[in-house]
Image (cartoon, grey):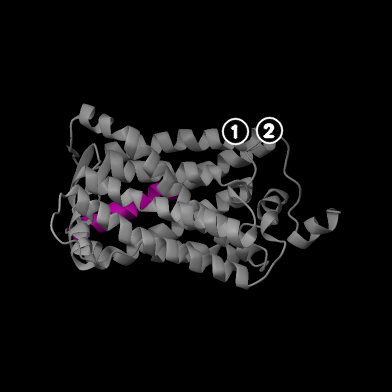
Amino acid sequence: MLPAMNDAFSRFVAPARPPVSWWRPVAALVCMVVVSIIGSVLVPAIAAAVQGITGPMSLERIFAQGAVALATLHRPVSVLLLLGTFVFWFCAVLAATCLFHKRGLRSLTGPWPGRRVMAVTSGIIVILAIGAAGSAVLADRPAQNMRFATWLGYMPVALPLLLIQVTAEELIFRGYLLQELAVRYQAPLVWWVLPAAVFGLVHYQGETFGSNAWLIVGFAFFMGLVLADITVRTGSLLPAVILHFANNFVAMMLVALDGTVTGLSLFISDIHVSDETAVRGHLLQGLAVAGVLYAFWLAWHWRCAGLHGRPAPHKSASDIDKKQP
């Protein structure tokens, strides 16, 4: 069933309505790209400095050495640098929204969740705790990657950077893009599916996953649909941020797939990314688990809706606007 515009979602997209013009989102997206390019220069330079490179620092040498540092994602510092690149994306979406739409962070995240949404969010936390424990148990004989004390020592830096990463992605895909499309098109296939499709495509990693690269895209696409649906139903970006954070924490910092981003993971699965058959089974299992957890979340949401009163019937954005003076 496709998500429909409801009162909570109408309030969530309301800041994007005045004025609805095409040049503003185009200029905002260009601004985001420019800031990301600046980040792509600065982060390799930082990576090169961390490696202790001396001598003439040409751009070519900076990128070459920085690429090596970022490619060796079995090192904790490299993973921290990778997560650090999302600081620029976070700043980019805020700067673009402020400059071209004259609105701030709150307009992208929606209102702070009320009692009912907090009840649903609590359900998400419980579900994700079960999912995290299940991932650790279902992984094929995971090997310990680093001592617990060492791993714990990295967390005060790694967790805030991970939060910035997932928040930046949510602000862009489930915040900015979803809002800008929803105020222009009534069809959910546009504002629900299109951002999820772009979200899936940016996760394409042909060199790493080989024939499974498009399966990764499909998994990310499915997660994009789920996160968008949660945002629509709650009228807030916070539940999606929590779900996204927990998913990335499990995949990057709890039990990582061997040959991927393992620098900050406590355990590493004995499945290597080069074993495409085993990886395919691992991904399909993860997709099935995600589907079950999403169904459980929907059941929790409907239960909370029943406890606190059913939401108002779904209405179009124009119907909501007619009520406003």
The amino acid beneath tag 2 is: Leu
Question: Which residue occupies 84% across, 54% down?
Answer: 323
Looking at marks 1 and 2 on the same chain, the residue that comes earlier in the sequence is marked by 1
Q: Position of residue 70 (x, y in %)?
A: 23, 55
Whether pointer 1 and pointer 2 mark residues with C-beta atoms closer than 8 Å, the reply is yes
Q: Is residue 285 magenta?
A: yes
Which residue is most to the right? 325
Q: Main secondary structure of the magenta part?
A: helix
Q: Quadrant of residue 275?
A: bottom left
Residue 213, given in percent of the width and then of the height, sits at: 29, 65
> From this viewpoint, is residue 135 visible?
yes
State the residue at coordinates (33%, 37%). 157
Question: Which quadrant holds the N terminus?
Answer: bottom right
Q: Position of residue 142 (x, y in %)?
A: 20, 39
* 167 in relation to 142, above or below: below
Q: Is residue 229 left or right of residue 319?
A: left
Q: Quadrant of residue 119?
A: top right
Secondary element under disc 1, as helix, strand or loop, is helix
59 on left or right of 89: left
Report the front residue among 47 and 209.
47
Q: Identify the residue at the far left of this view.
A: 55
Foreground residue, 259 or 288? Answer: 259
Which residue is denoted by mark 2 in the rendering? 307
Q: Which residue is mark 1?
A: 119
Point out which mark residue 159 bears: none
Q: Say left or right for 191 vs 49.
A: right
Dot 2 alpha-carbon crowd within 10 angstroms: few under 14, some 14 to 19, many 20 or more: few
Q: Which residues are magenta?
A: 275-292
Mark nearest the camera among 1 and 2 is 1
Residue 221 vertical placement versus 138 (above, below) = below
User: At x 72% / y 44%, what residue is drawn?
Assistant: 311
Q: Residue furthest top?
A: 149
